[in-house]
Image: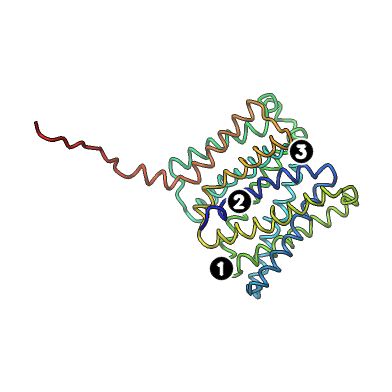
Amino acid sequence: MHPFWLISPFFFWGTAMIVMKAVLPQTAPLFLGAFRLIPAGLLVLAVAMAMGRSQPRSWRAWGGILLFALVDGTLFQGFLVTGLARTQAGLGSVMIDSQPLVVALLAWWLYGETIGLWGWLGLGLGLGGIAMIALSPQEWVNLSDWAQVWGHGEWWMLLAALAMAVGTVMIRWLSRWVDPVVATGWHLVLGGLPLLVLSGLGEGAAWSHLDGAGWLGMAYSTVLGSAASYGLFFYLAAQGNLTSLSALTFLTPVFALTFGALFLGETLTPWQLSGVILTLISITLINQRHRLHASGAQPVPVPVSVEPSP
């Protein structure tokens, strides 16, 4: 697999966060989430149909798609856009992409996968990093004020990470009965419909203030930030490229932090920056834990220099 295809989903996800944050002042969160999902899903389904991919036929397949749509579509995107309206795009991306920590725990619980010393170390560092990103030291002291806590978008992003982690585990199970590209398309469409209904009930004409640049940003987040990235990611995941994909997960927040600083002027406090560094280290340890364990279990060769006898 060419590195471009492996990296592209994370680049599009990271930059889409920046574009969505820039567009939010012209629209409303739930409408933005619905618009990101539904057209993208229709586009993925059209491509799948052109490729001759088979559609789901059994009740088990449709039931799995509906559950997948609820978790990885409605809940994930709903939490994401709610959090994005309350925090920086770069920080939000770091929180969302902490989901490998949850995936590791779910795989340990459901499939009996080994976490190991490096994995547990990564989980510990990740929890510390997330805690530092979510709240300042003073806010942790005043943690009893839950209204203040949920005013922080980072907590909504953490819920999005939990939903995405469950969705990542589900796609392996769902691909037994449904083509992964088709499942991706349907879960985007069906997951976006509840967001559209909720937006219509509570946000009014959320599209009325969008200008040309705003619609262009919406199109970017839909076509590249959803259709292309989701379709490619789940296709690669179903093909058994999980190790390569998981090793590159940290790139999404790196892209988001970089472009957020360049185009949105986002900055981090020293406390938040420390949390970001801890979280990125933890993601790397979690994703590379099997390789680190294998390298540590092997005997270390001792170089011996052979010199001519005197």
* Alpha carbons under labels 2 and 1: distance apart: 19 Å
Residue 123 is situated, as x and y percent measured from the top left of the image, at 53, 40
On screen, residue 119 above or below 183: above
The answer to whether mark 2 and mark 1 are in CB contact below 8 A is no
- Choose top left, top right, bottom left or bottom right for residue 69: bottom right
* Alpha carbons under labels 3 and 2: distance apart: 22 Å
Q: Element under label 3?
A: loop
User: Residue at image x 69%, y 62%?
Assistant: 187
Three-letter code for the amino acid on which mark 3 is drawn: Arg
Q: Which residue is mark 3?
A: 86
Three-letter code for the amino acid on which mark 2 is drawn: Ala
Residue mark closest to the camera, 3 vs 2: 3
Front-lying residue, 140 or 39: 39
* Alpha carbons under labels 1 and 3: distance apart: 38 Å
Residue 11 is situated, as x and y percent measured from the top left of the image, at 63, 48
Q: Is residue 293 left or right of residue 305?
A: right
On screen, residue 11 above or below 236: above
Q: Which residue is mark 1?
A: 176
User: Residue at image x 74%, y 52%?
Assistant: 220
The earlier-in-sequence mark between 2 and 1 is 2
Q: Is residue 278 left or right of residue 305?
A: right
Considering every residue shown, the one lying at the far left of the view is 310
The answer to whether mark 3 and mark 2 are in CB contact below 8 A is no
Q: Which residue is mark 2?
A: 165
The answer to whether mark 1 and mark 3 are in CB contact below 8 A is no
